Image: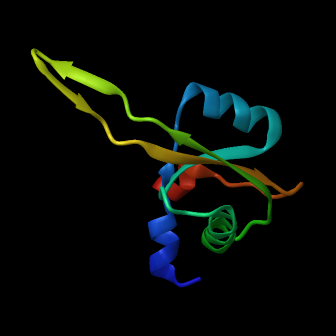
Amino acid sequence: MNDQRVFQVIRAPHISEKAAIIGDASNQHVFKVAVDAKKEEIKAAIEQLFKVKVSRVRTANVKGKTKRQGARLGNRSGWKKAYVSLEQGHEIDLAVVGG
């Protein structure tokens, strides 16, 4: 996989309370990914970018919220997130990656 596609597939780490709980409990990380990204692409991109072994990838499509401002109604864009499980002994330190 070329470097451009890696950065198109993996958009950003998803930082939330639920993601922190999952990360502490079971060596998983949550990422925002491209809507058209497939599980195999996500796995290859994570392994290439962070030099780790991925055991499993689960994805979820998040629907955009409906927002209202006065009489006008609009929708936020939907997005896709990936729950990435790492092999035993592998670790991603997101604090170092962002710095």
In the displayed structure, 99 sits above or below 16; it is: below
Q: In this view, does 70 lie to the left or right of 35?
A: left
Residue 57, position in %: x, y? 73, 54
Considering every residue shown, the one lying at the far right of the view is 88
Q: Which residue: 44% across, 79% down?
A: 4
Residue 20, located in which quarter of the rendered image?
A: top right
Q: Which colour scheme is used?
A: rainbow
Residue 22, position in %: x, y? 72, 33
Residue 48, position in %: x, y? 65, 74
On the rendered image, what quadrant is the N terminus found in?
bottom right
Q: Which residue: 46% across, 69% down?
A: 7
Considering every residue shown, the one lying at the far left of the view is 71
Q: Which residue: 50% across, 62% down?
A: 36
* Residue closer to the observer: 66 or 92: 66
Residue 53, located in which quarter of the rendered image?
A: bottom right
On the rendered image, what quadrant is the C terminus found in?
bottom left
Residue 35, position in %: x, y? 48, 56
Q: Which residue: 10% across, 15% down?
A: 70
* Residue closer to the observer: 1 or 61: 61
Considering every residue shown, the one lying at the far top of the view is 70
* Residue closer to the observer: 4 or 66: 66
Q: Is residue 76 left or right of residue 84?
A: left
Picture mark count = 0
* Residue closer to the observer: 32 or 91: 32
In the displayed structure, 70 sits above or below 97; it is: above
